[in-house]
Image (spheres, rainbow, N blue to C red):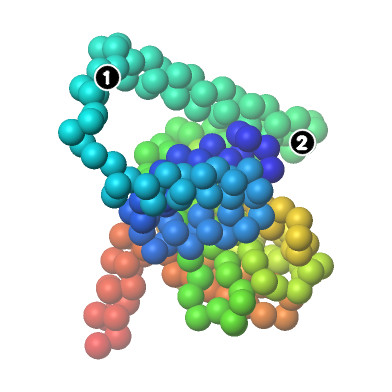
Amino acid sequence: MKTDGCRHWKEELGAYALGHLSDQKLAALEAHLEGCPSCRAEADSLLAVSRLLPHADPEHFGPAPQPPAELGKRIAATISSERRSKRRRRRLRFGLGFGGAAAATAMAVLAIFILSGGSEGNPEQHVAFRSLPSGVRIAATLEPQAFGTEIHMYVKGISSGTLCRVYMRGPGGDEVSAGTFRYRWGADDSAVLSAALDLSRAEALVVHAGDRTFVAPLGNAEAATRNQSQQEEST
């Protein structure tokens, strides 16, 4: 796996080594580590260090070094620049994939998402599928984007060669396709997909793995409000 694709996971390794991750984040990270030797090696080295921390003597520590006063601003500016570059590259790839009238239509749809605010202000969601067969693990990280939702899928333990079809379930039970990938045991068991559904409107993530279907509800406030209203109307 490319280093850039592992940046998010490497940021979680410190909390992982100290046992400070939530259950959902832990499940997603462990699924990633199964297929990424680089991150797994770094995690193992951090775990070894964390086991030694209880034996450290604070009386032998010197004063903690203070970072430069402008460091925070430099980091924030770098992150902002990288996000802008990523969005420009994504829009360019999106436009080059179509021709003529199709390109104009696609860009018009993208403009509507951007002008309406998209969903970039919402936080990403870590999803861990429950009630899975023994030995199977499915997890995902959902990131709001201007075009809808970017989905990082992680699968472990199903038959090699199984075709996995991923959908986001929106209001009313409609399912929006996010794409497909074929699971390969022993290879990189992750895939990056996308769906044209705003994350704030999604109620569940659905994975059809061969002839089996797995569903993970999403913790969106809007979806919860709709469900509560429907229950109140039915009573």
Left or right, residue 83 beside residue 68: right
User: For residue 184, which numbered disc appears in the image?
Assistant: none
Mark closer to the chain start, 2 or 1: 1
Q: Is residue 145 visible?
A: no
**Secondary structure found at label 2:** loop
- Nearest-to-viewer mark from 2 and 1: 1
Quarter of the figure with the N terminus:
top right
Quadrant for residue 132, please give it.
bottom right
Residue type marked 2: Gly
Quadrant for residue 220, please give it.
bottom left
Q: Residue 47: image x %, image y %?
A: 45, 50
Q: Residue at the location (48% across, 34% down)?
A: 114
The residue that label 2 is drawn on is: 97
**Residues packed near mark 2 inside 10 Å, few (<14), some (14 to 19) or many (20 plus):** few
Q: Residue at the location (29% across, 66% down)?
A: 225
The residue that label 1 is drawn on is: 65
**Secondary structure found at label 1:** loop
**231 or 165: nearer the eye?**
165
Does 29 sit above or below residue 14?
below
Quarter of the figure with the C terminus:
bottom left
Does 89 sit above or below residue 42?
above
**233 or 21: nearer the eye?**
21
**217 or 1: nearer the eye?**
1
**Residues packed near mark 1 inside 10 Å, few (<14), some (14 to 19) or many (20 plus):** few
Residue type marked 1: Pro
Residues at marks 2 and 1, CA–CA distance in whole angstroms: 50 Å
